Amino acid sequence: MATIIVSFGVPSDGFRSLYENNHTVHIPPAGVRFSREEMLALLPEADAVLACTPFPREMVEAGRKLKLIVCYGAGYDAIDVAAATEHGIAVVNIPETVTASTAELAIAHMMSMARRLRELDGLVRTMQPKELFVMGRRMGTRLEGATLGIVGMGRIGGRVADFGRVMGMRVLYTARTPKPERDALGDEHVDLETLMKESDFISLHCPHTPETHGMISRDMIALMKPTAFLVNTARGAVLDEEALIDALREKRIAGAALDVYIGEPNVNPAFFELDNVQLTPHIGSNTLATRNQMAQAASEQMLAAFSGRPLQNLLNPEAIRSL
Ligand code: NAP
């Protein structure tokens, strides 16, 4: 029977099939993570890991029996895939499980900023009604007819574009490869400069890679319309946070919404001083339905690996070849 480590106390209903197959699952209490020391102590006996927290080279190397690392979600930038490949350890992710909930969050952020929900909720609690219930003041932005710019037209970007189109938005997008299926729907493939200049809402959905690191740079942010909003549910390091803080402070853009940060779980305190930014703590996939689906998908990948069946979303096929 196999030994499995789940590095964080995530909702665990979806791990039932692992217990039913008599595997041993080490998982910390709900909401708690295994410390680095606990991980390094458990890893030598582990056959598979569900990496809900960063998984650097030292952990890969401590996993002397490891066959499989499952990334708990879509973005695998915190897993040292190259080290795993060197050691013949397969790495998979489970991106389909998080597409809907992350796209819904991006849209929620967009709508909330467009209609000033944070600000107005505060005012309803504190302001005299006769000063507040006034037509023509504190007006919002309509999404219908606005231009939505999707940076990274993959699973999540595609879903956000679908929502946008349903709401009557014009959709522009960037990606590395052509997307004829999106073009057929009327979405327009443009370069990043055009997208930054023309969009009213910009939503980031590319992975964090050496190529995308800092891609939404000071120069790119400077191209945005003063009425435009930026949403980042991708990864913090895809954008230049300092440049964004400057643009928000000087009101050169209308607003931003962030779910992800450079140096998470720390958030640059400069954001707390700004009322034109809304902040959430990396909750793209944080719905119970999604968490259960993630645990189930991760369990299926592990059961497949233990019984020699093919893996889905294998990120390093060369690791298997080197076995
Ligand atoms: P995906 O299906 O792989 O899509 C990524 C898209 O980004 C692809 O269209 C890809 O282009 C594009 N891309 C890659 N490099 C690019 C570049 N240099 N310039 C422009 N576009 C580029 O991934 P996904 O499932 O949509 O997830 C996207 C990211 O969201 C994840 O990597 C993760 O970091 C983040 N995420 C965050 C949360 C959260 O909780 N906030 C939850 C889930 C995911 P091609 O199609 O041409 O390759």
Image (spheres, rainbow, N blue to C red):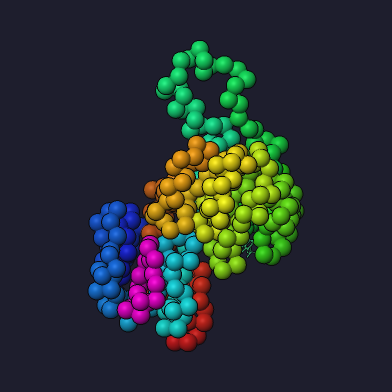
Residue at point 47%, 87% (across, down): 322
Between residues 222 and 198, which one lies in front from this camera angle?
Answer: 222
Give the answer, above or below, for where 77 lies relative to 278: below
> Residue 293: which quarter of the image?
bottom left
Residue at point 32%, 79% (across, down): 62
Q: Does the magenta stretch include residue 59?
A: yes
In the rendered image, which quarter contains the C terminus?
bottom left
Relative side of 126 to 20, left or right: right
Q: Give the range drawn in magenta.
A: 48-63
**Picture coordinates of residue 142 (x, y %)?**
64, 33
Q: Does the magenta stretch include residue 95?
A: no
Relative side of 185 to 156, left or right: right
Q: Which residue is at the far bottom?
A: 322
**Picture coordinates of residue 98 (x, y %)?**
48, 55
Can the viewer see residue 110 in this picture?
no
Residue at point 47%, 54% (across, down): 261
Q: Which residue is at the far top?
A: 130
Give the answer, above or below, for where 291 lies relative to 300: above
Give the answer, above or below, for where 257 lies relative to 152: above
Can the viewer see residue 203 in this picture?
yes
**Picture coordinates of residue 22 (x, y %)?**
26, 69
Between residues 247 and 136, which one lies in front from this camera angle?
Answer: 247
Q: In which quarter of the image is ligand 1?
A: bottom right
In the rendered image, which quarter contains the N terminus?
bottom left
